[in-house]
Amino acid sequence: MKTFATIGLLGLGLAFGAQAAEAPKTNSAVTAAEGKVLVNTGKAFSPAAIDMRLKAGDRVMVQNDSEATITFDDGCKLHIEENKLVTVPDKSNCAGAALVEQGINPGSGAAIGAGAVSNGALPIAAVGAFDLYMFFHEDENNTVSP
């Protein structure tokens, strides 16, 4: 019985150790924040703090009458204007990263264009329905030669 418990604990330790080793490394920090600046590191938005470390995928929301600056480890600075939501890239914009930036509604903090369906299920279902329609309504006699 002790052997099974020991093996179970060892397996759990290895699983958590592997998960911790795969955690993304930080690549930047919030170096300036004026007004209402929020950061989401995966769970919920919380107020940004100066020198707060960020990693790829974190989101920085700068609300109305506010601004922020992110400084990457390579020294590159990214200024974020009011009413913007920026996803932190895996490398700095000076190193060629594509910046993912989205406008937000002033005062509400909600992303512009955000609707009830945010997981992309509706567009995928629409494409699937169209493909199914085309499959059953395809004219086999209508051929096109190159």
Image (spheres, rainbow, N blue to C red):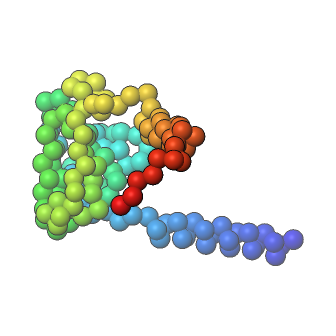
**Looking at the image, which is closer to me, 9 or 59?**
59
Q: In which quarter of the image is residue 66?
A: top left
Residue found at x 66% / y 67%: 12
Location of residue 51 with respect to 67 vertically, above or below: below
**Looking at the image, which is closer to me, 68 or 49?**
68
Number of numbered discs visible in the structure rendering: 0
Percent x, y for residue 133? 53, 37
Q: Outermost residue toward the right?
A: 1
Let me know if residue 50 appears in the view: yes
**Looking at the image, which is closer to me, 94 or 143?**
143
Q: Is residue 133 left or right of residue 117?
A: right
Let me know if residue 119 appears in the view: no
Q: In this view, does 143 lie to the left or right of 10?
A: left
Residue found at x 75% / y 73%: 6
Percent x, y for residue 141? 51, 47
Residue found at x 19% / y 33%: 83
Residue found at x 41% / y 40%: 44
Location of residue 10 with respect to 99 vertically, above or below: below
Please identify the quadrant where the C terminus is shown: bottom left
Percent x, y for residue 68? 16, 44
Please identify the quadrant where the N terminus is shown: bottom right
**Looking at the image, which is closer to me, 106 or 96?**
96
Location of residue 93 with respect to 46 vertically, above or below: below
Q: Is residue 102 left or right of residue 14?
A: left
Q: Outermost residue toward the front?
A: 141
Percent x, y for residue 87? 28, 49
